[in-house]
Image (cartoon, rainbow, N blue to C red):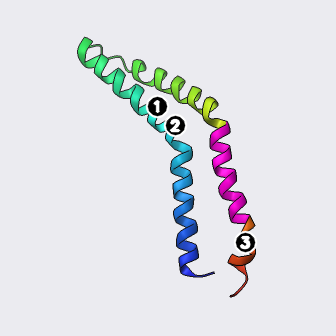
Amino acid sequence: MTLDDIVDIGQRAMWVTLLASAPMLLSGMVVGLTISIFQSVTQIQEITLTFVPKIVVVMVMFVLFLPWMSDTVLFFVRDLYGNIDTLVLPR
C-alpha cells in the first residue's frame, strides 16, 4: 500500500461522509434559515421555535434518505473490501 492509496481512500471516505450527511445538513440549514427570516420579520424570539422544527425535519430526512445513504456507504465499503487484496499485499 502506497501513500497514494492511503490518500485516495481517505479522500473517498470523506467524500462518502459528506454525501451521506448532506440531505440532513442541507434540510436543517434551509429550515433554520427560513425560521430565522420568519423570526426577524415577526420579531418573535422563541428559542424552541428554532430547534423543534429543525429536529423534526432532520429526522424526516434521515428516514427518507436512509436507503440512499446506506447504499452510498455500502458501495464504498464493498469497493474497499473488494480491493483489499491489492492494497494489503506488497507489489
Residue 60 image offset from top left, x and y in percent: 58, 26
> Residue tagged by mark 2?
23
- Labels 1 & 2 near each other (Cβ < 8 A): yes
Q: Residue at x 35, y 23 (%)?
A: 34
Magenta-drawn stretch contains 71? yes
Q: Give the amino acid at mark 1.
A: Ser
Instruction: Report x, y in % for residue 14.
Output: 52, 57
- Type of amino acid under label 3: Ile
* In the displayed structure image, the side of residue 64 where residue 27 appears, left or right: left
- Whether residue 25 is situated above or below residue 51 in the rendered picture: below
Q: Position of residue 74 (x, y in %)?
A: 70, 51
Residue at 75%, 75% (x, y): give it: 85
Please name whichever residue, 54 or 2, is drawn nearer the observer in this view of the structure: 2
The amino acid at mark 2 is Pro
Specify the principal SS of the magenta part. helix
Q: Could you give the CA–CA distance between mark 3 and mark 1, rounded to whole angstroms?
A: 36 Å
Q: Are marks 3 and 1 in contact (CB under 8 Å)?
A: no
Tag 1 residue: 27
Q: Reading the chain from its start, which is encountered first: label 2 or label 3?
A: 2
Highlighted magenta segment, given as a residue range: 67-81
